[in-house]
Structure formats: structure tokens, C-alpha cells
């Protein structure tokens, strides 16, 4: 073989190696793109939208005297909130404030009451509120994230009907209700208690295994093709 023929053969081999490397890079880009779209699609399908939870308190075994709402009920912690069967108090603010029978929640002894969540955040969408004994009762509703006050809204309620308030307190971990004032409605009782019903909230959905599988698939495609490309580069260097 002449020197010219040897150089020609070497150039041909190098060109072939470069062409092969180009094809590997092209396949890597294409496969990674497809895998990424699959992962995104999987995530979109599996995560979906957060679902609102409407807390009605009606599945709590309670009496007309009222019982403590236990922590963990409906996924939340309830401090100083009690629930009662309002049928025996139908002609008071407890009865008029009941949206879904038979139970309604209230702040015990008229003191501040809170609703919190462990290890996370939630959005408080809306609540139904009514005064138990006093017309013109003021209720301060405050939304916190840790110690930081993010939202504050004061509403004035009567004892003759429940009113829905769309609060839209987003990304909080605690909401506090503080009631004050008002004028005795003449029901034979007294105090700054309020009736709360249909507490509507939602939390962020947790990614399902399909989402994780899609992400791992994209990563696996990329790693495998990168290894193949690196091996091709090594073979080219040897030539």
C-alpha cells in the first residue's frame, strides 16, 4: 500500500467516525426529547388538580351540649373548636347557622379558635359563618404561615342566617378566628360564640408513582445514550 493510499484510508476512517458520532448525537437529542415529553405527559396525567375538601362536621358523633373536634379530623387540627347537633337549638344562631345538618362547629366559650395543618400548607377557600347569640358579631379571620401574618379579614355576622365568605387565603398553615361585640339577639343565651359550617379548603396534590416513573425513564434514556456516545468518541480517538 502506498503512502497516498494509507492517508486516503485514514481520512475515510476518520470521516466515518465523525459521521457515526453525528448520528449518535442526533439519536441522543431525539430520544431525550421524546423521553422528556413522556415524562411531562405522565406528570400532567398523574398530578392533576387539587381537590377541594368541604368539612361539614356531620360525621362526628356529638350531642346538643357540644363535643371537642379531635385533631386530625378532616386532615386538620382544631384548637378550641367544638361541634354540636343543632337540632335542639334550631331557634338560635346555632340552628340558623347550620348549612348541612345535623352538626355545626363553634368556638367554645366565645374564645379565639384556630385550624392548622401539620407539615404542610393549605388554601382556605371559604367558610359559612353566623353568630350564635349576638347580632352584629364581629369575627376577625387571620391566615398565618408559621408566625407570619399573611391575610386578615373582619366580617360582621348576624344570628338569623349563615353567610358564605370566600376568603381565598392561599398557602397558609394556620387560620385563627377571633369574635367580639354584637348585641344580644334575645335567644335566652349570651356570648360571642359563632357557628361555622362547610369549611372548604384544599392542599397540594402529591405526585403519584407514574410521575416518578416518567422522570426516571427520561433520565435512563439520556444516561444510556450519553454512555454510547462517549464510547464512540473513545473508538474514534483510537483510530
Image: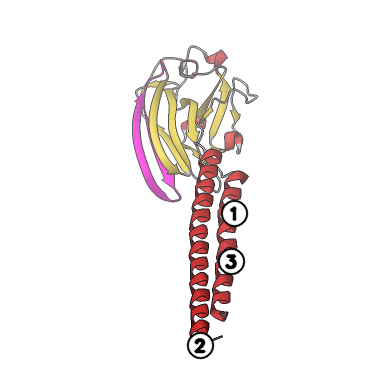
Q: Which picture quadrant has residue 138? A: top left
Query: Residue at the spot x=43%, y=21% of the render?
Result: 133
Q: Which picture quadrant has residue 136? A: top left
- Is label 2 in contact with label 1 (beta carbons under 8 Å)? no
Residue under pointer 3 = 228
Name the front one of labels 3 and 1.
3
Q: Which picture quadrant has residue 87? A: top right
Q: Where residue 104 sits in the image (x, y, percent)? A: 53, 23
Query: Residue at the spot x=48%, y=59% of the render?
Result: 26
Q: Is residue 217 left or right of residue 12?
A: right
* Residue 232 or residue 86, whichever sits in front: 232
Q: Where residue 145 sits in the image (x, y, percent)? A: 44, 48
Q: Which residues are magenta?
A: 137-161
Number of residues whose C-alpha sits closer than 10 Å to that of mark 2, classed few (under 14), some (14–19) or many (20 or more):
few
Name the front one of labels 3 and 2.
2
The numbered mark at residue 79 is none
Q: Classify the position of the N terminus by image quarter.
A: bottom right
From this view, report whether residue 228 is shown above or below residue 9: above
Work out whether mark 2 precedes mark 1 in sequence or the reverse, and give the earlier one: 2
Is disc 3 placed on a helix, strand or loop? helix
Residue under pointer 1 = 216
Is disc 2 placed on a helix, strand or loop? helix
Tally of marks? 3
* Marks 2 and 1, how far apart at CA: 51 Å
Number of residues whose C-alpha sits closer than 10 Å to that of mark 1, classed few (under 14), some (14–19) or many (20 or more):
some
Work out whether mark 3 precedes mark 2 in sequence or the reverse, and give the earlier one: 2
Amino acid at each position: 500500500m502506498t503512502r497516498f493510499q494509507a492517508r486516503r484510508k485514514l481520512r475515510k476512517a476518520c470521516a466515518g467516525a465523525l459521521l457515526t458520532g453525528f448520528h449518535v448525537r442526533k439519536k441522543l437529542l431525539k430520544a431525550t426529547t421524546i423521553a422528556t415529553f413522556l415524562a411531562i405527559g405522565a406528570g400532567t396525567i398523574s398530578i392533576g388538580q387539587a381537590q377541594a375538601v368541604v368539612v361539614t362536621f356531620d360525621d362526628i358523633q356529638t350531642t346538643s351540649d357540644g363535643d371537642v373536634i379531635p385533631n386530625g379530623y378532616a386532615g386538620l387540627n382544631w384548637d378550641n373548636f367544638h361541634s354540636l347537633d343543632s337540632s335542639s337549638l334550631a331557634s338560635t344562631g346555632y340552628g340558623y347557622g347550620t348549612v348541612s345538618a345535623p352538626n355545626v362547629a363553634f368556638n367554645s366559650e366565645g374564645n379565639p379558635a384556630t385550624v392548622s395543618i401539620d407539615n404542610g400548607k393549605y388554601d382556605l377557600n371559604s367558610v359559612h359563618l353566623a353568630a350564635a347569640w349576638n347580632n352584629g358579631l364581629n369575627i376577625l379571620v387571620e391566615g398565618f404561615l408559621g408566625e407570619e401574618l399573611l391575610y386578615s379579614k373582619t366580617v360582621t355576622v348576624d344570628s338569623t342566617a349563615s353567610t358564605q365568605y370566600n376568603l381565598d387565603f392561599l398557602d397558609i398553615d394556620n387560620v385563627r378566628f377571633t369574635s367580639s361585640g354584637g348585641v344580644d339577639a334575645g335567644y335566652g343565651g349570651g356570648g360571642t360564640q359563632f357557628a361555622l359550617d362547610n369549611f372548604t379548603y384544599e392542599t397540594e396534590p402529591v405526585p403519584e408513582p407514574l410521575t416518578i416513573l416518567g422522570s426516571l425513564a427520561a433520565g435512563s434514556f439520556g444516561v444510556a445514550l450519553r454512555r454510547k456516545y462517549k464510547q464512540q468518541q473513545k473508538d474514534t480517538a483510537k483510530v
